[in-house]
Amino acid sequence: MKIFAYTYTDPLLEPTPDPTDWGWEVDQTYQDLGKRSQLQQLFNDCKTQPPDYLLIRRLEELGDSVESVSNAIAQFQALEVILIAVEQSYNSSQESTSPRLDLLKLLQEIQHQQRSRRIRSGHARNRLNAAPPPGKAPYGYRRGKGKYIIDRSTSPVVKDFFEQFILYGSLRGAVRMMAKKYGKKISVTTGRRWLTNPVYRGDTAYQNGEIISDTHTAIISREEGAQVDRLLRRNSRLPSRTASAPRSLAGLVVCSECQSHMTVSRVTIRNQNKEYLYLRPITCQKHPKCRAIPYQEVLEYTINAVCRDLPLAVAQMNFPQLDAVKNSFSEAIARQQEILDQLPALQETGILDEETAKFRAYKLHTEISDLQAKLATLPPVNLRSVAQSVSIPQFWLDLSESERRFYFREFIRQIKITRQDKEWKLQIIFIF
């Protein structure tokens, strides 16, 4: 018994299948990538040495239209080759009580699949040309000739939104600012999508999850984008709604006795303008409950502890190893860019045709984007100098509560309060 197998793959849409993954012992495999030259060779070989069976994955791989698929099926039937589509449970040797109905259903399925393939292929070719995906342009941009163009009337709103978030680290605060200053009302969910959307950094993201860098003019710089990502990761570690809390210690303090996060409570006295702030556990299960602690005292202890311990914590970091990782990413990006620069010359000399060159360029662009994203997640190189600057007590005293909140969360993961009789002590856990 002789068995042949045939596959057609559009390299823009799917990876090349494993020629041995059929579950049958195949004598010869024919594979086409983008064009169907091997299909014609298969027809010629079937005329001289016809196999008993021909395996394919799906019938629509035999042509680009229903007519071409029907002609291919007819040719194999004329050659008495049994055609089996393994992913569609189709076997041309099986007799049916309603052949016309089966054929109609089959042709409708092939027509649907080929229409879907044409749409996906069109989107894939747009990706090769780094063209924007279908749909409305993101706020701050408008569509130009094959790329996004900055909308000068709305891009300042987006720029101000990002600057507000970077300055204060509060998504809700940035959303409120935009509504108050520009009358542009968006939800917090939409604001988060803006912060994570690669389009504002000059990149284009597609539905398949791949990103191509530097496809259009960016509204924020790479450095600002990296800062946004760090702030989002930092805020994700905090309890809900504390990222935009007005007090700098909100969301950071935990009672080590009851393991509860502590919230900032405000107490006022009737007929007096003065207010008193306390930190008290949110979900304390102890009886009696853990006592509240004056907020100002914890703040002063925290500032002193940061000034004392932060330079020591930074000094223990392995900066040479961190620099080596950054250099490794930078060198990999440079190598990929060097290959990218060689593609036009290879196309001119005929080594690569236009479609292959575009496909290779697309892959290189997505690999560069992945490397840039990994590089952006690493800590800033000036961390040691920053630690020296913020280890001065006067630096913290000159800041507002919102500014102090930003810097605390840049360095501190958690502040633990340990109680000892009527006294308490404080332990700071840094992010690094």
Image (spheres, rainbow, N blue to C red):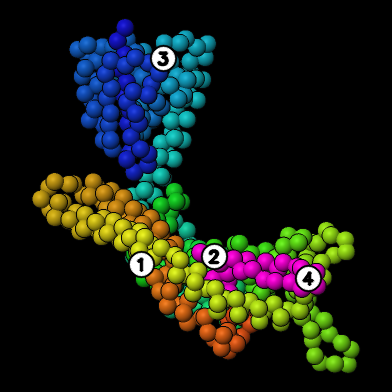
Q: Which residue is mark 2?
A: 431
Q: CA distance from mark 2 to mark 1?
A: 35 Å
Measuring from the top left, give residue 353's x and y in whole percent. 18, 46
Is the Cβ of the residue at disc 2 closer than 8 Å to that at disc 3? no
| Mark 1 and mark 3: Cα distance apart in space | 52 Å
> Of helix, strand and loop, which one carries label 3?
loop
x%, y% of residue 118?
39, 42
Asked if 354 appears above or below 220 in the picture, the reply is above
Magenta stretch in the rendered image = 408-432
Tell me the crowding category of disc 4: few under 14, some 14 to 19, or many 20 or more residues within 10 angstroms, Cα based.
many
Q: Amino acid at mark 2?
A: Ile
Type of amino acid under label 4: Arg
Q: Main secondary structure of the magenta part?
A: strand
Q: Nearer the viewer, residue 245 or 144?
A: 245
Is 269 part of what is drawn in magenta? no
Q: Earlier in the sequence, mark 2 or mark 1?
A: 1
Query: Which label is found at residue 216?
Result: 1
